[in-house]
Amino acid sequence: MEKTFLMVKPDGVQRGLIGEVISRFERKGFKLAAAKLMVISDDLAKKHYGEHADKPFFGELTDFITSGPVFAMIWEGEDVVKTARHMMGATKPSEADLGTLRGDFGLTVGKNIIHGSDSLESAEREINLFFGEDAALEYKKSSDEWVY
Ligand code: DAT
Ligand code: MG
């Protein structure tokens, strides 16, 4: 089954939104496969956001993501990469639809609550970067037969 990497950013953790984020993905029908509260090292931040290394906001971005605990997760389910991006909303909260996490809880592009992989390739890369291979727990969820 498809997997994605999601992470409640330091602003979401400080604002008490871990439960809200988990709840939305649980209620949607997705399955939590791994989770940990952690502080990202400078090295990991630079690798994770490597695609943005040339952008003017790169320093601000890595400073922010390392500024406090994040809640890293692997979620599993049909089309989870694309669907999770819809549930997060647009990068800029001012452009994110209400009903999305960023639309409901964010105000600025920097502090936008949540990270989610943007493709199958980045999901695999980010899962390996944060959890390593084989970290996703395989288990049967009794609700699956009512979701699929
Ligand atoms: P997303 O997080 O939606 O995948 P992204 O990969 O383009 O967005 O950018 C990563 C993060 O960098 C984003 O969540 C917030 C920050 N960011 C993006 N564009 C920015 C900008 N123009 N100014 C400041 N921060 C920005
Ligand atoms: Mg991105």
Image (tube, rainbow, N blue to C red):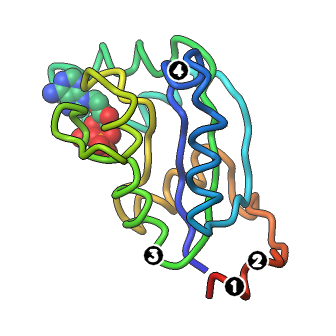
Residue marked by disc 4:
10
Q: Considering only order in the chain, which callout, 4 or 1, is on the residue closer to the N terminus?
A: 4
Q: Mark 4: give few (<14), some (14-19) or many (20+) Cα within 10 Å.
A: many
Looking at the rendered structure, the number of numbered marks drawn on it comes to 4
Under mark 2, the amino acid is Ser
Q: What residue do we see at 45% from left, 75% from top?
A: 79
Q: How far apart are marks 1 and 2 (CA)?
A: 5 Å
Indicate whether 112 appears above or below 24: above
Q: Considering only order in the chain, which callout, 3 or 2, is on the residue closer to the N terminus?
A: 3
Residue marked by disc 3:
79
Left or right, 58 with respect to 112, comes to left
Q: Which of 31 and 137 is in front in this view?
A: 31
Instruction: Look at the numbered disc 2 and say if its residue's Cβ is closer than 8 Å to ligand 1.
Output: no
Under mark 4, the amino acid is Pro
Left or right, 7 with respect to 73, comes to left
Quadrant of the image containing the N terminus:
bottom right
